[in-house]
């Protein structure tokens, strides 16, 4: 495996297309992450709080897991496991077989790659369609994802254009928006006809049994809402104790992963579709995947289970940024893959990945979960050395190195001698570019810094102290948490508008009296003749609907026929999919992210905010809250628990899977218009 890694790494370094793609990803992800974290009042405090939540969860993993399973089952979700990789994939296949599934739509899930669920389903005669744009592209090419967050990171738009032309039989085009539209069109019928949808799980909330799925393109909502059966695959460590804890982790996950304050869609799923609800999966299955996690929890690599799968460590790592994900030979690449892969799949097979690191600490610096990568990588190296045969020179050299380092006097003498002789080796701009074996292994691919003629310890006494001097004995520097001040409602409206427009949404501010006219005027301006309605019959909505009918616009009732009425199911969905606009109300708006919160229930269809190209949403100004956490504490908990699923929507659907070029509108709406009512 080590030789194979080195071979793939050298091939990656010699691939100009890959180098260009990796550079674009690293630069844009890095800038986005910094900007997003800068919007927090106290970024470092939030990161520390998130890390503490994760540590407490992993420290009490079995207790939190038992609570989550109990509450999820009480909600009506069928829980399977924890299971091995083989058993988990087999369980997914058996569930699909029970429902005579021929077509399965799937949103992006690293754990599904880990357990090879696609292969198991395809072996059973089912067709599996990856619906995330990046995953869809690499599936067409027969490749594995190249990144945890950006599966097609290794491809340029020309590569994607050639793939679409050859595999989808469409005209050649390198226009990213056009290619995205092609993917939407090709996958649309699959969404509407699939018998089973499979998703991953970002978080399982123990206190409520809630399944949280975080996506941007809208495919996650499609997969978990349209098919009658939903299967969620979840690594058993992806837990959070409470909804308040979830609010904190959502703040850091989106910022670290994609540079967003919050992703476009956060789905909080409680239970299957109830009898009076217009849509949603009629069965929800949760497959908990162990596959070595409980054993890892008892090992010295336990801390790696803190990972949120944000991919920030990959974007920061100087090794990953040069060789990409495929060289690692594992589902999980980069610094986190160098820990997770040996921890889950065996030190003998993947221990060598721990050496694919400079130990520079960039991964630790950006990790929102506070994982000490350097410490864990060194631990993994230590275990790998014990299990793998080492070269004779290394076996002899390490005791000698230990003997030298054990004595300050010996260390200084060796350093002095080495500095003298290194002066005679070839150098370029002060850097040594050729050393004799075995040190030639270093200079074969990078330069070596010469040792200083005068060591630091010899110069230390001449250095002047900087800053304000040392602190008093026993004094500890305490980070001050910013005192929260409740903002005025007018300030919340202004902040909400700024955030809505920053995420490419549209904001309309009006009075209750103006609202019916404003809504009708907007619909006339886009020349629509039908919309998907929303079943909430408030007097305000009744007045608006009457005004819409007066304008000659048809209002369609958005409801999916039950699975036993399969003959009309597709025809109904295909008809609803033609409506260009959906109109809903919402429970609340979040000023810090420009988010609107939609519930489910009798007459409250998710299709209205999911299928049309344009989503219009009505929000009362008094229902704008500073943040998700504020809303939860003000009564949001009850709304989450009482809904089969509740959705946080932040701007229109989006993707940046091709060359990191932002494209608005994928599987969900391409326009979000928020009418905020005084």
Image (spheres, rainbow, N blue to C red):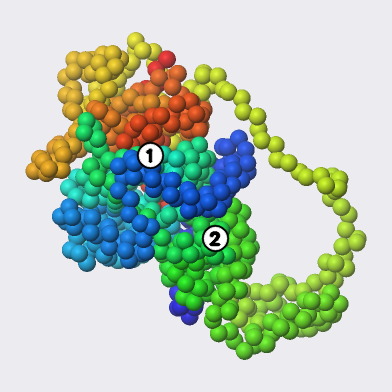
Measured as percent of width and height from the top left, residue 430 is found at 73, 72
Left or right of 70: which side holds 163?
left
The image quarter in which residue 538 lies: top left
Extreme-bottom residue of the structure: 392
Left or right of 391: which side holds 670?
left
Nearer to the camera, 171 or 229: 229
Residue count near mark 1 (Cα–Cα under 10 Å), binned few <14, some 14–19, many ≥20: many
At horizontal 18% and vertical 22% (from top left) the residue drawn is 553
Q: Examine the rendered structure and indicate whether residue 134 appears above or below residue 401.
A: above
Instruction: Give the mark nearest the N terminus, 2 or 1.
Output: 1
Task: Give the position of the C terminus as an image quadrant.
Answer: top left
Circles 2 and 1: CB distance less than 8 Å? no
Measured as percent of width and height from the top left, residue 118 is found at 28, 62
Q: Secondary structure under badge 1?
A: strand
Q: Nearer the viewer, mark 2 or mark 1?
A: 2
At horizontal 38% and vertical 42% (from top left) the residue drawn is 71
* Residue on which the image places disc 2: 302
Q: Secondary structure under badge 2?
A: helix
Left or right of 257: which side holds 470?
right
Q: Examine the rendered structure and indicate whether residue 420 appears above or below residue 545.
A: below
Q: Examine the rendered structure and indicate whether residue 76 appears above or below residue 136.
A: above
The image quarter in which residue 394 lies: bottom right
Nearer to the camera, 408 or 302: 302
Extreme-right residue of the structure: 462
Nearer to the camera, 654 or 360: 360
Q: Of the numbered discs in the image, which one, if any, rests on residue 268?
A: 1
Measured as percent of width and height from the top left, residue 297 is found at 51, 60
């Amino acid at each position: 495996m080590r030789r194979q890694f080195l071979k793939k790494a050298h091939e990656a370094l010699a691939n100009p297309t890959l180098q260009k793609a990796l550079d674009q990803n690293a630069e844009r992800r890095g800038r986005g992450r910094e900007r997003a974290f800068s919007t927090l009042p106290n970024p470092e405090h939030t990161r520390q709080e998130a890390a503490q939540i994760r540590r407490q969860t992993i420290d009490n993993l079995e207790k939190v897991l038992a609570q989550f399973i109990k509450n999820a089952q009480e909600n009506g979700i069928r829980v399977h496991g924890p299971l091995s990789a083989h058993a988990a994939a087999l369980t997914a296949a058996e569930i699909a077989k029970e429902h005579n599934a021929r077509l399965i739509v799937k949103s992006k899930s690293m754990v599904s790659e880990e357990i090879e669920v696609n292969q198991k389903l395809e072996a059973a005669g089912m067709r599996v369609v990856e619906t995330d744009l990046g995953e869809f592209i690499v599936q067409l090419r027969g490749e594995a994802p190249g990144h945890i967050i950006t599966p097609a990171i290794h491809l340029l738009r020309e590569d994607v254009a050639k793939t679409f032309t050859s595999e989808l039989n469409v005209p050649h085009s390198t226009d990213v928006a056009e290619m995205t539209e092609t993917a939407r069109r090709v996958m649309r019928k699959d969404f509407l006809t699939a018998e089973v949808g499979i998703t991953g799980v970002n978080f399982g909330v123990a206190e409520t049994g809630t399944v949280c799925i975080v996506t941007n393109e809208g495919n996650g909502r499609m997969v978990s809402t349209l098919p009658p059966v939903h299967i969620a695959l979840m690594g058993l460590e992806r837990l959070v104790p409470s909804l308040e804890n979830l609010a904190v982790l959502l703040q850091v996950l989106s910022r670290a992963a994609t540079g967003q304050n919050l992703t476009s869609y956060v789905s909080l799923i409680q239970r299957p579709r109830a009898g009076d609800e217009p849509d949603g999966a009629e069965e929800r299955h949760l497959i908990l995947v162990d596959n070595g996690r409980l054993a890892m929890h008892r090992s010295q690599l336990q801390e790696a289970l803190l990972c949120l799968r944000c991919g920030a460590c990959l974007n920061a790592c100087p090794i990953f940024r040069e060789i990409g994900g495929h060289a690692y030979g594992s589902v999980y690449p980069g610094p986190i893959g160098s820990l997770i892969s040996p921890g889950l799949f065996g030190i003998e097979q993947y221990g060598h990945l721990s050496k694919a690191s400079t130990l520079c600490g960039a991964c630790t610096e950006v990790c929102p979960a506070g994982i000490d990568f350097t410490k864990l990588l060194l631990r993994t190296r230590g275990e790998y050395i014990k299990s793998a045969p080492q070269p004779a020179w290394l076996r002899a050299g390490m005791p000698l190195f230990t003997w030298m380092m054990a004595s300050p006097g010996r260390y200084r003498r060796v350093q002095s001698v080495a500095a003298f002789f290194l002066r005679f080796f070839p150098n370029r701009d002060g850097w040594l570019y050729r050393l004799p074996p075995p040190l030639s292994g270093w200079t074969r691919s990078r330069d070596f810094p010469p040792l200083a003629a005068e060591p630091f310890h010899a110069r230390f006494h001449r250095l002047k102290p900087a800053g304000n001097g040392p602190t008093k004995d026993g004094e500890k520097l305490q980070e001050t948490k910013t005192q929260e001040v409740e903002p005025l409602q007018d300030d919340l409206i202004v902040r909400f508008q700024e955030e809505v427009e920053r995420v490419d949404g549209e904001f309309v501010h009006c009075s209750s009296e103006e609202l019916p006219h404003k809504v009708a005027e907007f619909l006339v301006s886009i020349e629509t003749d039908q919309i998907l309605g929303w079943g909430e019959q408030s007097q305000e909505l009744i007045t608006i609907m009457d005004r819409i009918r007066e304008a000659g616009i048809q209002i369609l009732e958005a409801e999916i026929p039950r699975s036993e009425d399969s003959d009309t199911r597709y025809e109904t969905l295909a008809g609803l999919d033609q409506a260009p606009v959906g109109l809903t109300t919402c429970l609340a708006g979040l000023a810090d992210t420009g988010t609107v919160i939609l519930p489910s229930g009798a007459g409250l269809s998710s299709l209205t905010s999911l299928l049309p190209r344009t989503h219009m949403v009505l929000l009362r100004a008094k229902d704008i809250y500073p943040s998700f956490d504020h809303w939860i504490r003000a009564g949001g908990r009850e709304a989450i628990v009482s809904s089969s699923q509740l959705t946080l929507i932040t701007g229109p659907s989006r993707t940046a899977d091709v060359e990191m070029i932002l494209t608005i509108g994928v599987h969900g709406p391409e326009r979000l218009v928020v009418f905020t009512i005084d």
